[in-house]
Image (tube, helix red, strand yellow):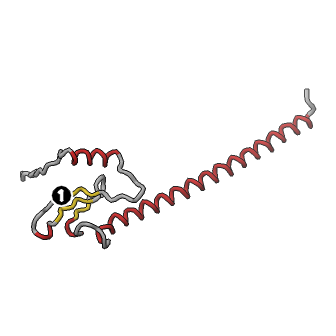
Amino acid sequence: MLAPDTLFFIVGWIWVWLFIGFLLAKMYFYQELKSQRKKAVTKSKDVTLWYVHEKLAPILPNFPYNYKDLSFLWKWVDYIVFDWLQEGHVKQVVFLEIKSWKSRLNQNEKLIKTAIDTKKVRYETIRIKKK
């Protein structure tokens, strides 16, 4: 059997090391949380800035289409261009996706591009009847 003062000494050191471990874990998770928040803020700024670029792209000087011929969709396809509609006739209909220099089409955008390239596109009108 251990003497009471020896037992107290061992239990005291266990508590000290547990407390030190707790503080180290708290510091590690604080740094990790700080890093994740910084990444989230950076990504949020990038996304917001890109949304602004998507909306402003049609009024830039070298944009190939008349901004009046555009209809903004936003999801999967940014714009539908009815080329020359403001002139009274439509030369072509273009599904326009605006990307930055590094970004690529996501899976849904690739599927839409394939459907358009294989001419699986049509125009449809749905009429709602009054009761």
Quarter of the image for residue 6 reads top right
Q: Nearer the viewer, residue 7 or 123?
A: 123
40 with respect to 111 (left or right): right
Report how many numbered discs are placed on residues in the image: 1
Task: Label 1, secondary structure: give it.
Answer: strand
Q: For the N terminus, which image quadrant?
A: top right
Q: Nearer the viewer, residue 11 or 99?
A: 99
The structure residue drawn at horizontal position 12% and vertical position 62%, both measured from the top left corner, is 90
x%, y% of residue 57? 32, 67
The structure residue drawn at horizontal position 35% and vertical position 50%, both measured from the top left corner, is 105
x%, y% of residue 103? 40, 54
x%, y% of residue 117? 22, 47
58 with respect to 40 (left or right): left
Q: Which residue is mark 1?
A: 93
User: Please, is residue 97 above or below residue 89 in the view?
Assistant: above
Question: What amino acid is found at the position of numbered circle 1 in the picture?
Answer: Val
59 with respect to 36 (left or right): left
Quarter of the image for residue 63 reads bottom left
The structure residue drawn at horizontal position 88% and vertical position 39%, both measured from the top left corner, is 9
